[in-house]
Amino acid sequence: MLVQTEDEIVLGDDPSRLHENSGVGLPAAVLASATLLSACGGGGGSTGGTGSTAPVINAPPVTEIQASRFLAQASTGATREQIARVSAIGYAAWIDEQIAMVPSQTRWDWLVAKGFNAAANIFTQNGFDSVVWYKLINAPDTLRQRVTLALSEIIVVGIDGLVGAGWQAFSAAQFLDLLEAQCFGNFRTLLENVSTSAAMGQYLTYRGNTKYNAKTGALPDENYARELMQLFSIGLLKLNPDGTPLTVNGVQQETYTLDDITGLARIFTGWDFDLSTSKTDTPDFLRRPMTQVDSRHETGASTFLGATVPAGLNGAQSLKAALDIIFAHPNVAPFICRQLIQRLVTSNPTPAYVQRVASVFMNDGKGVKGNLGAVVKALLLDDEARNAANLSNPQSGKLREPVLRLLAWARAYKLSSVSGNWSIGNTSDPATRLGQSPSRSSSVFNFFRPGYLPPNSAIGAASLVAPEFQITNESTVVGYVNFMQRLVSLGNTDLIPDYSSLLPLAENASALLKEINIVLAAGQISDETLNSIASAVNTMPTGTDARKNNRIYAALTLVLAAPEFVVIK
């Protein structure tokens, strides 16, 4: 069995040195252009919309530009093949096809197949980053991967917080597998699976939670009860069905109080790892839901959110009753739907957009509440997502988070791993990498908050939000360009992109950039920016395949740094 330490790309020691490129000498003019383009990549990371009253479901044909734009929202990266598929069958049919697709191999099974369940890995994170990137880049069910990534940033478990039981890679992988298994299922079921997952029990510290003890003064841990309401279901403020704050005499209303947290915390007593069939010398116990220790469970009544879970219920019964109370709260639909729209489509959806999608959450057309597959389909087909008028709307769009920028390139150019171990590693370092790495948020509040306002900015002055800007600064801008320039120019011996489709175009800068613009940027790079990039590329020699490749590297690096790529509409 293979036991391998995570292999990470090593960039130059000085993160400000954009010319650190593993011997592939890009001209200074090209690299300077990359810095300038990336540095101005902030404008318009938010959205408004046309406010149509009904979703638009486009029948074929869909143009390649429209298909690429759709895939920027609905996948982990557009490819020529997926663009052709969307163009051939239309948006709705593509979504149905993706939802019906048999799920790809689980992260857990990949880790086992690679031998990471060997005893040497108990107290390591070995294999985790590899399997996360492997799935995001390769899995054919790309819509499922995109929605799983979105859910992982709403219902957060960070691998570094999974302490005390070992097997961190397996615990974090199982949580992502759980989200993936339910990402087109029912939100109520998802909440229950999350609430009994070993990973969440570890991360928000209610595993081993015990009832009140008058003699010792022990109290139930309130951590999960608080975050379940604040972050995973209803939020801090009461909402209208369109996601705007509900006010009484002009005053916003809080959804819960400290007493509600205390009441709900009683529900999460008695839960612990299920060690009935295995011990901690293998990771198998982390794959099973937590189980109840009856002696630790609070059997008295628990009151929160204006409702009461009656006394005398066992732990599982109490949990079901409590989650039913939360699921019935009117905030759940607008609170969750707005964040899903932000993660997939736009930072500032109009209230009308939120309400249309929330109405599908409340009733999928078949009388079912919480159908996430129907919600995803509705938000992607909505007029505010599909209408081309938003391309010229200064309030439209969103800043691509760094992970999605890397994935756009990796998917487009069929990145492969020579070793099969996907040695991208932890990309959290903001100075030399992406400043973000999947499932490595430093807290339950994700990498960025959905309501983040960049200080002293035009976005903030317009009362708009731009979540991804919370991890955007001078260091991350330069670090991102450094990192991508190294990857693009074959700086990692394990990770190999396929530029065969670009090589015949390499000597014609305009043709090369047109193709890259369609696949990577959905045709949204302006003529002015394209001309600027073409001028830089045209300073480079042609003739040999090596020189052609250098022109490809330069064109890709500059497009990846361009504002119109970094901000997608």
Image (tube, grey):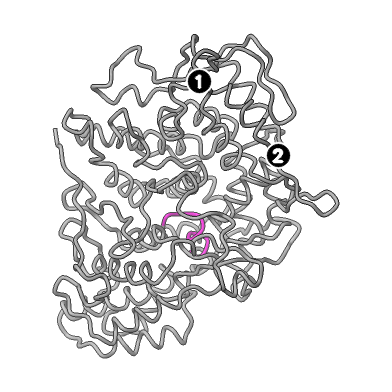
Query: In what element is the residue under mark 1?
Result: loop
Q: Is residue 70 a member of the stretch shown in magenta?
A: yes
Give the residue at mark 1: 218
Is label 2 in a helix, a strand or a loop?
A: helix
Which residues are drawn in magenta?
68-76
Quarter of the image where the N terminus is located: top left
* Residue in the image at 49% along x and 16% along y: 216
Q: Earlier in the sequence, mark 2 or mark 1?
A: 1
Q: Residues within 10 Å of mark 1 (few under 14, many from 20)?
A: few
User: Of circles 2 and 1, which is in front?
Assistant: 1
Relative to 272, is 123 above or below? Answer: below
**Label 2 is placed on what type of residue?**
Met
**For the residue marked with disc 1, what is the amino acid?**
Ala
Q: Determine the main secondary structure of the stretch shown in magenta.
A: helix
Q: Position of residue 440 (x, y in %)?
A: 37, 47
Specify whether residue 377 is painted magenta.
no
314 or 115: nearer the eye?
A: 314
Q: In this view, does 377 lie above or below 503?
A: above
Residue underneath mark 2: 362
Q: Looking at the image, which residue is at 21% across and 53% down? A: 417
Q: Which mark is residue 17?
A: none
